[in-house]
Amino acid sequence: MNLENLIRENVKKLSPYSSARDEFEQFTKPMIYLDANENPFTNGMNRYPDPQQKELKTIIADKNNVQKENILLGNGSDEVLDLIFRAFCEPNRDNIITLPPTYGMYGVLANINAIENREVFLNEEFQPNVDAILNAVDSKTKIIFLCSPNNPTGNSFDDSAVIKILNQFKGLVVIDEAYIDFSNEVSWLTVLKDFPNLIITQTLSKAYAMAGLRIGILYASREIISVLNKIKPPYNINGLSQETAVKKLLQNTLSTQVRKILVERNKLIEALSKCEFVEKIYPSDANFILIKVDDANFRYQQFIDNGVVVRNRSNQPLCENCLRISIGTKEETEQIIELLKTFNNAEKSIIYR
């Protein structure tokens, strides 16, 4: 892969904005800061945050056995995904490939950035159709997006399929690992150095229980990170989010919470397997379960009428009459299991509206 051939021409020529905190690091010793036009009255939030999030990156790097220079942080995964589009895809010229059913923001970002989105559906087992994907590639194809574990299906993609795409595609391959911590599969981070065209995205929103902080993580080669840093907003992660994320990561509650979620996932799968209206339960490597039911609109309304919000995914390809159910606490799972028993005994004509 020749990275220079993938970068947009205007980005190649771009001189990134240099903020006050890029030019001068804050010292631990007392200093008088008169360089950033900040309000001088201390309240814990009057100073600009670290634009490169060095402390937070150090912790993330140590946890994942990577270098800080291989990390870019964004205001949620959506921002880092958008940066990829804006750095490498020429509007009204280039195209990307996505694999529905999958995370909808890839297509939204393509539309926002005026990039053609070539959809190659997953097969009936929700696995990539590699030959069809590679046949859809042309000289203007810049990125292939792989969501693994996939949303909304919950399954991980076969390693052999992913490796074939990485080896044969000359553009960028983005593997979205938002749900990797709930899977027994090994993260693709372990081979990041082996594939210069590989970009991996993760998040603190799911397993790390920090959805409210909006912190997305992107891992890639130093060369790719350097390109993305040229167009990254200078203070894209606010100070409170950085401080809170550092504290919570140091508390190291990930394994305990993930283990509890997996226990509840198994309990819910067992309960769903006993429901007459559930036609199929798809394998899950995530913190949710996709199920095929007899009538998704009706069952969705049943949940709503009983105070439970699930997601109707019937509008997605290959997901007709499918509901996606996130895994809750032990108490919430117990309530859902009891509720499912009433669904089995309910008459559609009585409940349906």
Image: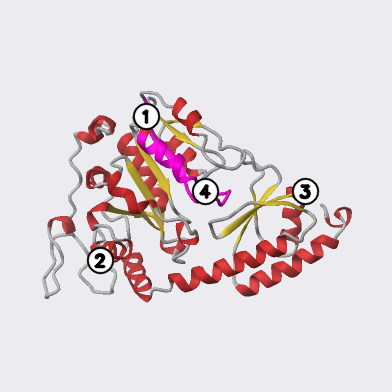
Q: Position of residue 50 (x, y in %)?
A: 24, 62
User: Marks 1/3: CA distance?
Assistant: 43 Å
Give amino acid for label 1. Answer: Pro
**Residue with the mark numbered 1:** 91
Of residue 104 and residue 49, the one placed in the foreground of this image is: 104
Give amino acid for label 2. Answer: Glu
User: Marks 2/3: CA distance?
Assistant: 50 Å
Mark 3 and mark 4 lie on one chain; the one further toward the N terminus is 4
- Tag 3: Cα neighbours inside 10 Å, few (<14), some, or many (≥20)? some
- Tag 4: Cα neighbours inside 10 Å, few (<14), some, or many (≥20)? many
**Residue with the mark numbered 3:** 294
- In the rendered structure, are the residues bearing label 1 and label 4 in contact, judged by CB atoms less than 8 Å apart? no
Query: Would you say residue 232 is visible in this rendering?
Result: no
Relative side of 27 to 136, left or right: left
Mark 2 and mark 1 lie on one chain; the one further toward the N terminus is 2
- Tag 2: Cα neighbours inside 10 Å, few (<14), some, or many (≥20)? some
Q: Is mark 4 on a helix, strand or loop?
A: loop
Relative side of 126 to 296, left or right: left
**Residue with the mark numbered 4:** 150
Q: Where is residue 81 in the image (x, y as percent from the top left)?
A: 39, 45
User: Residue at left 52%, top 32%?
Assistant: 120
Q: Does the magenta stretch include residue 154?
A: yes
**Residue with the mark numbered 2:** 55
Q: Position of residue 223 (x, y in %)?
A: 22, 43
Mark 1 and mark 4 lie on one chain; the one further toward the N terminus is 1
User: Marks 4/2: CA distance?
Assistant: 30 Å
Q: In which quarter of the image is residue 125?
A: top right
User: Marks 2/1: CA distance?
Assistant: 35 Å
Give amino acid for label 4. Answer: Asn
